[in-house]
Image (cartoon, rainbow, N blue to C red):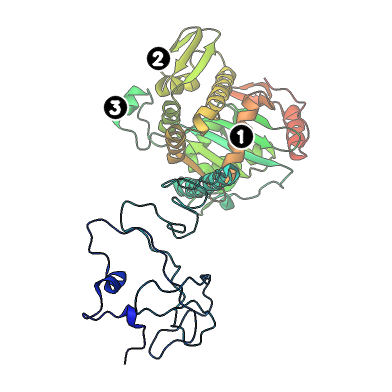
Amino acid sequence: MNNWPEGWSDEDGAPQQQRRYGRGSAGAQPERARVMRHVQRGDAPPGAPAAPPNSSVPRQPAHGPEDHAGAPSYENEQDPGAAYDSGYNTGQVYESRGGRRGPGADGDGQGPGGPGGPAGQRPPKPPVNWKRRIGFTALTLAVVLLVTSVATYFWADSKLKREVDLSHVIERPEAGKGTNYLIVGSDSREGMSEEQKKELHTGSAEGKRTDSMMILHVGDNGNTMVSLPRDSNVRVPSFRGTSGKMYPDTGREAKLTDTYSMDGAELLVRIVEFNTGLRIDHYAEIGFAGFANIVDAVGGVEMDLGKGFKDKYSGADFGPGKQTLDGQQALAFVRTRHAFTSDLDRTKNQQKFLSALAGQTATPTTVMNPFKLYPVMGAGLDSLIVDKDMSLWDLSSMFWAMKGVTGGDGKSMNMPISGSKGANLVWDETKKKQLVEQLKNDEKVTVTGN
């Protein structure tokens, strides 16, 4: 049995006018909006879907009597027999095309385009949080810098050649305040081809000797660099060789540069400590090839020479004035001694060159440029020999102290000389003792050298 009003029947026998409300018009043009009779919300007939519990659709006012024959009237809202309304009917029928859409057509009741705007307009983007962006960028850069620094540390640490064992040195002086480095430039030709030896004028002598020696004291009251002339006359004390064999003190004297070739770096440290009374904490040595490679890696070193000189043994050939020295020229410059009357002039040239090299290496254009910094570090570390206890921190401290001293922030001097013995230079014992005491106590050095 059909519970819906007869006028709403969808059967084929219903009048055409009644069917048109449910099936659409048969005319060519779409129908205009019509007002539909309100159906009183009441109990749902059996089998009909239940109305939503919180429906917000307003109840439409009652209309007049039905205009169509046979259709019931729904005017009485209190009629308990009124037909069921699900609550979804708003009482408005819209044109199918071309007509204006009614309220709520966009689903929000605000008209086309959403609230308060024409169709297609998007809401404005929120302003950029620059503070957050800058903070994120800074954090990213800090992480990259940290990772790069850690990677560089392990890379550099792996390149250090820790070959000198200072524990083999016997009868050592007591340690004083501050840190003392023995910095050695050797004439080692290890790893050099015959062509390189010829180009750098190094000769082909076997073994290696010390070509330059300096004691660098790093302390709280100023740093001091003391050059030890290679022709210094020293006494060879008892010592333990690298093989472990003990050699007694025979009272023998020798030229300082020759003692290295007797038994290596450990013996050289033993002789320096014995003849000065100053304890050496760390040892660093660089050969000919390494020195030249560092100069080339940094792009050459600019020097201002007061006068020119030549030396056929070292290959030096310099005129006066400003000039940039490459690796080959720099090695010839620091090795030249036959052009001077004393080895002391040679040590002064070495100090002058180290000042220029350190000043040019520790510049922002080198330190902040990885394409320049890494070749310089690689060239130096590949040929640098240090003691087993030397850390990168110790090496860095040595470099910056040397840069400061040679740059004028500290004291640079030769070991005081009192005369000569044969072809060897003799140290001034009185000034030497005073100098050593000041270094041990980390006092300001007042002693003057030659």
Q: Where is residue 153 in the image (x, y as percent from the top left)?
A: 51, 47
Q: Which of marks 1 and 2 is in front?
A: 1
Q: Position of residue 141 (x, y in %)?
A: 52, 44
Query: Exactly how many numbered labels are in the figure?
Result: 3
Q: Name the residue under label 1.
A: 400
Q: What element carries label 1?
A: helix
Q: Is residue 349 visible?
A: yes
**Residue 376 vs residue 419, the one in the foreground:** 376
In the figure, is residue 295 to the left or right of 20? right
Packing grade of label 1 (10 A; few <14, some 14-19, many >=20) is some
Instruction: Please give the name of the residue rendered at 50% of the width and 30% of the height, measured from the top-left corner.
Output: 366
Quadrant where the image shows the C terminus? top right
Q: Nearer the viewer, mark 3 or mark 2?
A: 3
The image quadrant of residue 93 is bottom left
Q: Name the residue under label 2.
A: 312
Distance of mark 3 from mark 1, alpha carbons?
Answer: 34 Å
Question: Label 3 sits on what residue type?
Answer: Glu
Classify 332 as above or below 236. above
Q: Position of residue 298 (x, y in %)?
A: 45, 27
Question: Label 1 sits on what residue type?
Answer: Trp
Question: Label 2 sits on what residue type?
Answer: Lys
